[in-house]
Image (spheres, helix red, strand yellow):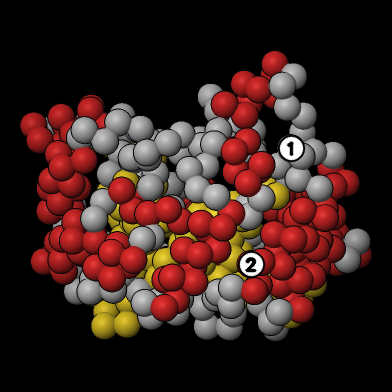
Amino acid sequence: MSGIYFHIPFCKQLCHYCAFHKSISLQAKARMLSCLKKELNDRKNYLTGNKIDSIYFGGGTPSVYSPEEIQSLILEVGRHFIINDNSEITLEANPDDLTHDYLKALKDTSVNRLSVGIQSFHDEDLILMNRRHSGQQAFDAIKRAQTYGFDNISVDQIYGVPGLSLKKWEENLKKVFELNIQHISSYHLMYDPNTVFTHKLKKGIIKEVDEEVSLAQYKHLISEAKKHGFLHYEISNFSQSGFESRHNSSYWQQKMYLGLGPSAHSYNLNRREWNISDNLKYMKAIEEGGAYSECEELSFNDKFNDYVLTSLRTMWGLDLELVKNEFGEFYHQYCLEKANKFIQSEDVRIEKKHIILTDKGVFISNDVMSDFFYIEE
């Protein structure tokens, strides 16, 4: 089973925290759509005949395209690949794009999962982040989508935002759970290079939230998600049982995927590829048959470290039997030795031959995962 990812590199407005590749000029939308279809045709053999279990439209803001345009890309996938009947097809969307007309048309497409970028229900936070919707618009958009029959909805939330108190974060989560959605992706604000927030931080215009406040917000998220029956199946992701993101899980479970569009990444178990992060250069290369991607051949040890990084992020953990069978006894023993250290500190546990982060270990997950990496001398 494989997944296909479309990177839609357009936004109507620039969010101040976002480091993803995008353009706020929409002039090249039609040309980009054509190039995405051409790249799909050019790379139709990349997944070596695997069936497609998930299609994901990310960005950027994929909902800048009409439902008919999104469906045309899905149909193009179907021309080159076998799409499973019960495949998961996700569209990321901004709340203010999800109008009655848009949702009505979208329901006639193959899209069966929505990922809605809410980020906060507090208008002052949304203004600070330069979002183009209000908290009420976000709440109403989810309710509206549900009335049109969308019953697999994920929402994005950001914590650790300047000015976001624990009380305000608790209010955000209360509204999220009122919506009766199926999935939550919640991320700590990152100050990535070349973002407005990072510029403001360096200028002293905004201040980072204290680590203790961020930790309290994350702990409250975990507690409330559990209380409402959500599985904490990946460090930043929570779902009702059976509603885990199949597409994102394919990344964490080392499955093959094909990424299309500028800045999109692909993985075929042996190497990683990434497209150039420049709309004009990407489109010109696609149209003229030029090079538009780079690649990295993965060593045996790279593959092991990749598996460590992706598996320990999840509730399923690192499979010791898989390590023994795929990587050999040396790496198997290495994992056991590393696990013993963190078992003593109660940061991991071994359950049914899987090394799994404990609730305590989740808070230092980066330290645990990096310690499990094998560094060749």
> Can residue 352 be seen?
yes
Q: Which residue is mark 1?
A: 162
Q: Secondary structure at mark 2?
A: helix
Q: Amino acid at mark 1?
A: Pro
Seen at 48% across and 43% down, the residue is 132
**Spatial separation of the CA atoms under disc 2 and disc 1:** 20 Å
Q: Amino acid at mark 2?
A: Val
Q: List the single residue furthest toward the right.
A: 344
Percent across and percent down for residue 41 are 12, 53
**165 versus 71 height, above or below:** above
Instruction: Give the label on residue 176, or none.
Output: 2
**Considering depth in this image, is 40 or 147 the residue closer to the camera?**
147
**Considering depth in this image, is 124 or 227 the residue closer to the camera?**
124
Indicate the quadrant where residue 346 lies: bottom right
**Considering depth in this image, is 26 or 343 the residue closer to the camera?**
26
Percent across and percent down for residue 60 are 39, 44
Mark 1, Cα crowd under 10 Å, few <14 / some 14-19 / many 20+, is some
Seen at 41% across and 57% down, the residue is 92
Indicate the quadrant where residue 113 lies: bottom left
Seen at 42% across and 71% down, the residue is 145
**219 versus 163 height, above or below:** below
Seen at 54% across and 36% down, the residue is 130
Percent across and percent down for residue 94 are 43, 53
235 displayed left or right of 217 = left
2 displayed left or right of 219 = left
Mark 2, Cα crowd under 10 Å, few <14 / some 14-19 / many 20+, is many
Number of marks in picture = 2
